[in-house]
Image (tube, rainbow, N blue to C red):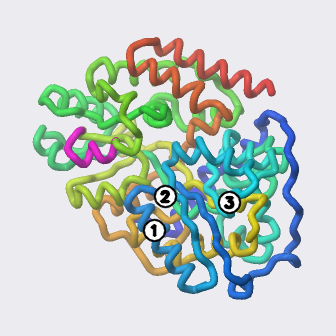
């Protein structure tokens, strides 16, 4: 099992070896008032002297382990500072993305929000002056000394919102994450299949599951993003990590290149062969792990953010692995990074308390809480190690990905509109209403338009 130090190395030197170069790509321009500048001298870290404060926090930590994690940290913060009451507003990832811009532009926005990385969310919010630069707070709390540069780069934006990976820090993340393959151990035993060691073995296992009356893959794609993630896992195996990184960060390649089209065709084939739910485009993303835990699906492609909830429901019957490589024993590749960062809104009435809150929930002690609640901490936990089998699986996968430089970026980082511009065609592809070539041409059109700007 990998040491926590290894986790820091992975995200610090691998993911953002690519992500830091995202500054070469530009986001659309726009206006918006800039938040008032602050200096370290104007920052107060004395929360107890702030008076009675209600701190409104919007987060998307709604899954079992995530929810327990943030509830435990919130309770501990309020116990340390009885003058602060946290008004927590919990929303699903999808609902948060839909409502956050309106909330930030209103006259009474939340104090702390989870603003997704990338051009579509954080970049646009920074450009519009809706988020507060954390630079003066970093100089007081020392976050860039605590976190590796790779992680802080992912949450850094230039003030004009045009470059990700440089500029000021606008958020801190609590957890790391990777997308891999969950499997139901009982169902694998039932169909007489061992956990696959290669990509070909994985596809043969899908066929065997189908042939023996089992649903091969649990898959809900109502929100479009799941389809992009499953496509990305396939793409990593067919295209290779370097070409995926270059493509996402605008350094070369096209979505219409042969291997990328082949990945889309593979997704279409899986749907046609009955490996995916027939009604996948009507199933909510958050319902997918629920269905999987209830026995629908031998495998499920998904992120580590679901591990704690699946362990609660399935105990030792659930396993996890990085997507199997092309050759047995080769280094695996998959997408990943860090969880949604916590940011301070520009109109917060209590920015100093908000900063103290972010410092608290990303502290070394918080990393221990992350492990205790079945999550994958972004930084070294000082005393805790995972004990649940599925979390040990995830630690082993993280270790292999670290050693093999195997993390690729999330594909929706490519453009501000990629979630819809590519996710929509993938929904049509899964439904059999479009072709792989047509889906990839739609992705390339959105990508080309963005790069021209």
Q: Is residue 38 above or below residue 75?
A: above
User: Which quadrant does the C terminus fall into?
Assistant: top right
Quadrant of the image occupied by residue 359: bottom right
The part of the chain drawn in magenta is 288-296
Label 2, label 3: how far apart the Cα atoms are: 14 Å
Q: Earlier in the sequence, mark 1 or mark 2?
A: 2
Give the residue pinned by disc 3: 343
Percent of width and height locating residue 156? 73, 54
Give the residue pinned by disc 1: 69
Percent of width and height locating residue 246? 65, 34
Label 1, label 2: how far apart the Cα atoms are: 8 Å
From the image, give the main secondary structure of the stretch colored magenta. helix
Q: Which mark is residue 61?
A: 2
- State left or right for residue 203 relative to residue 16: left
The residue lying at 43 percent from left, 48 percent from top is 303
Indicate yes or no whether the magenta region holds residue 243.
no
Quadrant of the image occupied by residue 358: bottom right
């Amino acid at each position: 099992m990998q040491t926590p130090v290894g986790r820091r190395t992975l995200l610090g030197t691998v993911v953002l070896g690519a992500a830091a170069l995202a500054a070469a790509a530009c986001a659309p321009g726009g206006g918006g008032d800039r938040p008032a500048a602050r200096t370290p001298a104007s920052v107060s870290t004395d929360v107890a002297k702030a008076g009675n404060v209600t701190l409104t926090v919007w987060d998307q930590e709604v899954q079992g382990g995530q929810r327990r994690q943030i509830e435990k940290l919130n309770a501990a913060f309020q116990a340390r500072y009885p003058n602060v009451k946290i008004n927590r507003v919990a929303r699903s990832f999808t609902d948060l993305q839909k409502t956050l811009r309106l909330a930030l532009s209103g006259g009474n926005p939340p104090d702390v929000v989870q603003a997704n990385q990338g051009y579509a969310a954080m970049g646009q919010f920074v450009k519009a002056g809706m988020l507060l630069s954390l630079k003066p707070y970093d100089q007081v709390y020392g976050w860039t000394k605590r976190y590796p540069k790779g992680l802080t780069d992912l949450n850094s934006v230039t003030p004009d919102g045009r470059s990700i990976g440089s500029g000021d820090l606008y958020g801190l993340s609590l957890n790391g994450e990777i997308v891999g393959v969950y499997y139901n151990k009982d169902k694998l035993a039932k169909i007489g299949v061992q956990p696959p060691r290669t990509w070909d073995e994985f596809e043969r296992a899908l066929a065997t599951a189908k042939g023996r009356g089992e649903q091969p893959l649990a898959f809900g794609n109502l929100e479009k993003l799941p389809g992009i993630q499953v496509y990305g896992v396939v793409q990593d195996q067919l295209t290779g990590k370097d070409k995926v990184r270059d493509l996402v960060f605008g350094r070369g390649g096209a979505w219409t290149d042969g291997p990328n089209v082949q990945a889309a065709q593979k997704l279409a084939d899986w749907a046609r062969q009955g490996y995916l739910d027939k009604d996948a485009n009507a199933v909510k993303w958050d319902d997918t792990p629920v269905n999987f835990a209830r026995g629908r699906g031998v495998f499920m492609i998904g992120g580590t953010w679901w591990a704690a909830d699946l362990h609660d429901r399935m105990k030792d019957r659930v396993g996890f692995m990085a997507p199997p490589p092309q050759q047995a024993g080769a280094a695996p590749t998959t997408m990943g990074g860090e969880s949604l960062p916590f940011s301070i809104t520009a109109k917060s009435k209590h920015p100093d308390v908000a900063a103290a809150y972010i410092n608290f929930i990303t502290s070394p002690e918080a990393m221990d809480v992350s492990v205790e609640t079945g999550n994958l901490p972004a930084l070294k936990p000082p005393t805790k190690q995972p004990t649940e089998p599925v979390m040990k699986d995830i630690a082993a996968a993280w270790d292999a990905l670290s050693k093999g430089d195997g993390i690729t970026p999330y594909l929706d980082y490519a453009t501000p509109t990629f979630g819809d511009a590519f996710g929509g065609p993938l929904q049509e592809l899964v439904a059999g209403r479009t072709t792989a070539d047509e889906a990839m041409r739609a992705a390339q059109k959105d990508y080309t338009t963005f790069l021209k700007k």
